[in-house]
Image (cartoon, rainbow, N blue to C red):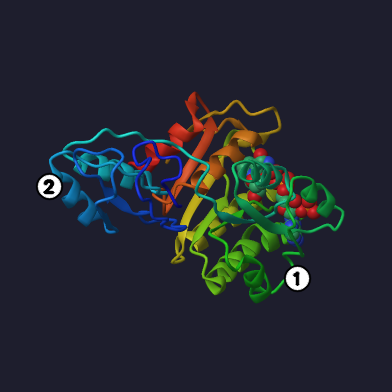
């Protein structure tokens, strides 16, 4: 992202636009010691170079950098010998996200949240009458059936995305459909992501021990088995994956807090909060190749995701 326009530290300086940079530094500029309004003394681009210049200057660093990587924020802050660090979460890093199952209960909530934070959103929906509702939140998604669409067709729709979220599901329609959507649909989407060159892939899965105490029917056991097979397929891929296992979903309004960790007790969780967690995870590339379990809890969602980004 460019910086400088509203940067009080650099006001009056000759600000060079750095253009749109997603994961790297937008640029660093060391100010002369005596002048807050002087000409920018130098422009450097590499992290190590910027840190070395700042630490050698005797007066520190005045700069912004934009990153999607919270771990990098902490690394740079620690490496600066003299500095005043302000960390701001912003809506400034826009991403393009493709949601498989975008018209579903969780998928639609996620689409709306991502749009609200300024992201570009696309996705796969099955029924033509869903287009209107999606248009209502400013999304012109891709109409298609996961059963019949070819991986290369799906890849074309996904091309140019920064992340894919798979939140489709057969909803227990039949064992055949559960296998076709909840497992084979995931595998097809993984293949499509590979063909499209999209690395980041978030999968909505399920707690393996969900409702063990209820002695569920064979259809539910089949659902659990294929969900696990989908988890395995994604975890064995070379994608930058995250598997999110929410507790039993409910439609009560979100509360903005959760419990999120590699192991949780299965209870319930609100779809709004699942969608908000997915939205944070999409924007937290430092959280990668992790299986996470999500339940109701007291931790603000951004904090819960941010804590994982630092581990
Ligand atoms: N329900 C729970 O308690 C629970 C718990 C943990 C995890 N999960 C998982 O969480 C995810 C989201 O659940 P949810 O209840 O929010 O989802 P949902 O409302 O059932 O949405 C699923 C979406 O997938 C779409 N879909 C199904 N078959 C398709 C096909 N052949 N082609 C294209 N799209 C298709 C559906 O399309 P239509 O709108 O046309 O039906 C629907 O929009 C699912 O993967 C589910 O397994 C659920």
Please count the marks in the image: 2
Per the image, the residue denoted by label 2 is 56
* Ligand 1 is within 8 Å of the C-beta of the residue at disc 2: no
Element on which disc 2 rests: helix
Please give left or right for residue 162 compared with residue 218 in the image.
Answer: left
Rounded to the nearest angstrom, the CA distance separating label 1 from label 2 is 61 Å
> Residue 69, position in %: x, y?
38, 48
23 vs 34, nearest the viewer: 34
| Res 311 visible | no
Residue furthest to the top: 298
Please give left or right for residue 197 compared with residue 65 in the image.
Answer: right
> Residue 252, position in %: x, y?
70, 28
Please give left or right for residue 215 compared with residue 65 in the image.
Answer: right
| Res 40 visible | yes
> Residue 79, position in %: x, y?
20, 43
Per the image, the residue denoted by label 1 is 148
* Point 59% across, 42% down: residue: 117
* Ligand 1 is within 8 Å of the C-beta of the residue at disc 1: yes
* Earlier residue among tags 1 and 2: 2
Please give left or right for residue 306 compared with residue 126 in the image.
Answer: left
| Neighbour tally class for label 2: few under 14, some 14-19, many 20 plus, Cα within 10 Å | few
Q: Nearer the viewer, mark 1 or mark 2?
A: 2
> Residue 294, position in %: x, y?
52, 37
| Neighbour tally class for label 1: few under 14, some 14-19, many 20 plus, Cα within 10 Å | few
Element on which disc 1 rests: loop
Above/below status of 240 relative to 78: below
């Amino acid at each position: 992202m460019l910086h400088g326009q509203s940067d009080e530290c650099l006001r009056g300086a000759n600000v060079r636009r750095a253009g749109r940079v997603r994961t790297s530094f937008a640029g660093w500029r060391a100010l002369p010691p005596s002048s807050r309004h002087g000409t920018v003394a130098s422009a450097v681009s590499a992290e190590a170079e910027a840190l070395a210049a700042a630490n050698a200057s005797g007066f520190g660093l005045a700069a912004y950098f934009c990153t999607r990587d919270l771990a990098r924020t902490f690394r740079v802050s620690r490496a600066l010998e003299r500095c005043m660090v302000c960390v701001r979460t912003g809506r400034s890093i826009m991403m393009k996200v493709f949601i498989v199952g975008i018209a579903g209960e969780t998928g639609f909530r996620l689409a709306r949240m991502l749009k609200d934070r300024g992201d570009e959103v696309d996705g796969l929906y099955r029924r033509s009458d869903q287009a209107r509702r999606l248009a209502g939140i400013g999304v012109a998604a891709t109409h298609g059936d996961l059963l019949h669409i070819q991986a290369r067709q799906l890849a074309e729709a996904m091309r140019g995305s920064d992340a894919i979220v798979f939140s489709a599901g057969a909803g227990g329609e039949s064992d055949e459909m559960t296998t076709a959507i909840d497992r084979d649909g995931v595998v097809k989407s993984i293949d499509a992501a590979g063909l499209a060159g999209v690395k980041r892939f978030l999968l909505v899965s399920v707690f393996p021990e969900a409702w063990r105490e209820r002695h569920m029917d064979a259809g539910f056991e089949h659902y659990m088995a294929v969900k696990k097979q989908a988890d395995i397929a994604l975890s064995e891929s070379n994608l930058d994956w995250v598997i999110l296992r929410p507790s039993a979903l409910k439609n009560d309004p979100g509360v903005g807090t959760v419990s999120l960790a590699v192991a949780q007790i299965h209870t319930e969780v609100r779809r709004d909060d699942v969608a908000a967690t997915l939205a944070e995870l999409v924007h937290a590339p430092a959280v990668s190749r992790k299986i996470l379990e999500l339940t109701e809890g007291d931790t603000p969602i951004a904090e819960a995701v941010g804590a994982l980004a630092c581990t």
